[in-house]
Amino acid sequence: MLPKPTVLVVDDTPDNLSLMSALLRDEYRVKVANHGEKALRIVQDDPPDLILLDVMMPDLDGYEVCRRLKAMPQARELPVIFLTAKSEVADETLGFSLGAVDYITKPISPPIVLARVRTHLLLKQSQDFLRDKAEYLEAEVARRGAELAAIQDVTILAMASLAETRDNDTGNHIRRTQHYVRALALHLRQDPRFAPQLSDAAIELLYKSAPLHDIGKVGIPDQILLKPAPYDPAEFEVMKQHPRLGRAAIEAAERQLGRAVPFLSVAKEIAYSHQEKWDGSGYPEGLKGEAIPLSARLMALADVYDALISERVYKPAFSHAEAKAIIRGGSGSHFDPAVVEAFEAIEAEFVGIAGRYRD
């Protein structure tokens, strides 16, 4: 059996408290308060389900009590019904403006009071149910969103690991480059030219997608991918296929699902276009300038910087200063000048990332 709803009656007249208690106690649990301060303490400690509130009381009148109740988080949604001999329209208007749900004039009619109390308690129950339902649905949406984000992260990292395990020289390359890309994006969005493309959500997607930039290496033969020396022209032509292979691998995953996957759109851009150059001399399409997606322009600098400062069997690691000079020299040819400017502005962050995720 459900417990009875609790009704708090606030009135400074003992006879009125006795009358209301006798009227309500068969259907409700009744609490009483003979002044406003006591009513506020009761609500603070154990909020009722509904309040019947007299207006004309010493010290705190009913209007002030209602005003304070509506300022209390635990009482903001409690229905308040004024019971008063004040029957002017202005009095009722003030009561409703303070948040009361009803206004009953004295002398009261018991059937009317019972009907109004019953009605407002039913309304409160409905509102509580809908509010709880809404909170549950909001929490469920958040939970499923977090679950989906986790699945996306695992999918991306699993795919990226395929490329990393094929190329043992890269070490922490994919982790460093994703942090470089995010650092560049966070700085670039201070520029009004780039801000519309670099919301928090977009930057997070860039960060998550960056590890897939070399996914296409899974399709490059080992004798070329793992060659401990620079490539000859024929081998380089084979290696140049990895952007196409990377995009194709992501598209193949989408086909398995039967539909395009929005969160992989940036990954496809990066995988396919991160070898393009600002002056149009890159591959696979020979795109030029802003025809190259911003995501790929960011990845291009991050990828080259990390390759320069990393030791390979066919070359020593360059210092940060040497890598910086090469990147600066490629501004306007290999790299977007704005991205180079961003790199120079945050070069200390690049040094820190390289140190945290060193091989």
Image (cartoon, grey):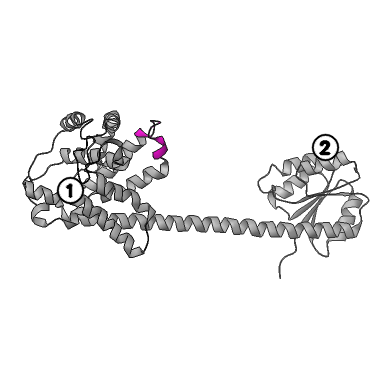
Residue 308 placement (x, y as % from top left): 16, 38
Residue at 32% in and 37% down = 183
Q: Quadrant of residue 123?
A: bottom right
Q: Nearer the viewer, mark 2 or mark 1?
A: 1
- The part of the chain drawn in magenta is 187-198
For label 2, the SS is: loop
Quadrant (top left, top right, bottom left, bottom right) of the C terminus: top left
Q: Which residue is mark 1?
A: 170
**Residue 88: where, in percent of width, then height?**
90, 41
Residue that numbered label 2 is attached to: 59
Identified at 41% across, 45% down, the residue is: 201
Is residue 355 visible in the rendered structure shown here?
A: no
| Callout count | 2
> Along the line of sight, which residue is nearer the eye, 317 or 12?
317
Q: CA distance from mark 2 to mark 1?
A: 77 Å
Question: In the rendered image of this protein, does residue 353 appear above or below residue 31?
Answer: above
Secondary structure under badge 1?
A: helix
